[in-house]
Image (cartoon, rainbow, N blue to C red):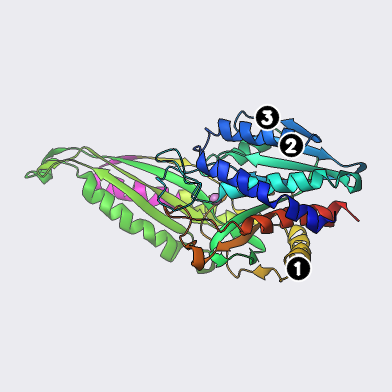
Amino acid sequence: MNIEQLIASVQQQVVAWRRHIHANPELSFQEIETADYIAEQLATFGCLQIRRLTPNSVVAELQGALPGPCYALRADIDALPIHEQSDEVCCSTKPGVMHACGHDAHAAMLMGAASVLCQLRDRLKGSVRFIFQHAEEVPPGGAQELVDLGVLDGVAMIFGLHVFPNYPTGEVLLKPGVFSASSDNFDIVLQGKGGHGSQPHLCIDPVVIGAEIVTSLQQIVARKLDPLHTPVLTVATFQAGDSYNVIPDSARLAGTLRTHSQQVREQVPALVENIVAGISQAHGASYSINWTPGYAIGNNHLDACKVAHQVVASSCGQPLQELPTPMFGSEDFSSYQQQVPGCFLFIGSGNQQIGATHGFHHPRFKLDEAVLQVGVKLHVGFIQHLLIS
Ligand code: NI
């Protein structure tokens, strides 16, 4: 069989894997049964060295017959705390847990690619590392954990795919360079002095102080940073008080910073503190600020993008489309890209005819299973391009 026939021959199996994983979703950091299932299936191929760096992830290595470099392919495997309302035949069997970001498809596509590449082992000049990674959805994320455990040791380059329902199946998209934002969260606690709502002069009202801070924080975006590199700074939580006539003692503000510039990422915390400190001090309140660092900025390496262009043109029958702007979403694939050159591509998975039109994390998110073959083709294509002459 030639490579195309091999890919076609695993198609039915890839659909079955995807449906099993979709029907049995597990939340981030709890993907033990999913990882067990993937490892069991991979073991049946007979030629993979399987490691479990964590109980909820799987790393499988295919040693080619000939010596050469090692390339990594990554899929994420975790689901979301969403109650599925799609009409998928393989609808979630777990109330309140759902694969609504296509990670079930990512896992199945990579399993399919592993199956095909095992059958091409005699022609491989190097090795392939298949990474089935846990916890993409929840910082600090599974990618960093695996990187810290050495998952990239000896890896020359890494590729990852993500389905994208906003584009029709068959289209492949890439944003060269920076493609995703960093995401850091902050918690601010304002300590005032509570009292009766009718006696504000005897209190230090953290609600009014907090309101002033929320408004002033937008000055950072509007007036403190280069307008070509403005971040998103969102206060998403404002908690204080629980009554009509009690001025509360304290208030909590929490939110997120998203940016495509590492310099801005490093600048903003001090600017936030200036504002919080200044306003709190002016009104006699005290404060604390705590930042929880999230994912790094995703950056597609130009060498890896070049490979992607050639592979998409030869295996998908249509050119790779370049996205003009990065997204403000974040993706922990960036943890790998901080270590080795890597490229993260989006593969269209939308199909109006079957109702696969809902966006990520929607309870009616639905997958056009035709995308599975595109994913297998691309994963196999990267390795064919790099390790088979
Ligand atoms: Ni996702």
Left or right of residue 50, residue 285 in this image: left
- Which of disc 3 and disc 2 is earlier in sequence? 3
Which secondary structure lies at badge 1? helix
Q: In which quarter of the view is residue 164 placed?
A: bottom right
Say which residue label 2 marks: 60
Say which residue label 1 marks: 313
Question: Quick one: label 3, few (<14), some, or many (20+) residues within 10 Å?
Answer: some
Q: Is residue 86 magenta?
A: no
**Is residue 148 placed above or below 313 in the rendered structure?**
above
Residue 1 appears in the figure: yes
Say which residue label 3 marks: 52
Amino acid beneath label 2: Ala
The quarter of the picture where the N terminus appears is bottom right
Which secondary structure lies at badge 3? loop
Residue 332 appears in the figure: no
Left or right of residue 191, residue 335 in this image: right
Q: Is residue 280 magenta?
A: yes
Q: Position of residue 326 (x, y in %)?
A: 57, 63
- Which of disc 1 and disc 2 is earlier in sequence? 2
Circles 2, 3 touching at the beta carbon (< 8 Å): no
Q: Nearer the viewer, residue 174 or 290?
A: 174
Amino acid beneath label 1: Ala
The residue most toward the right is 66
* Residues rendered magenta in the picture: 270-287
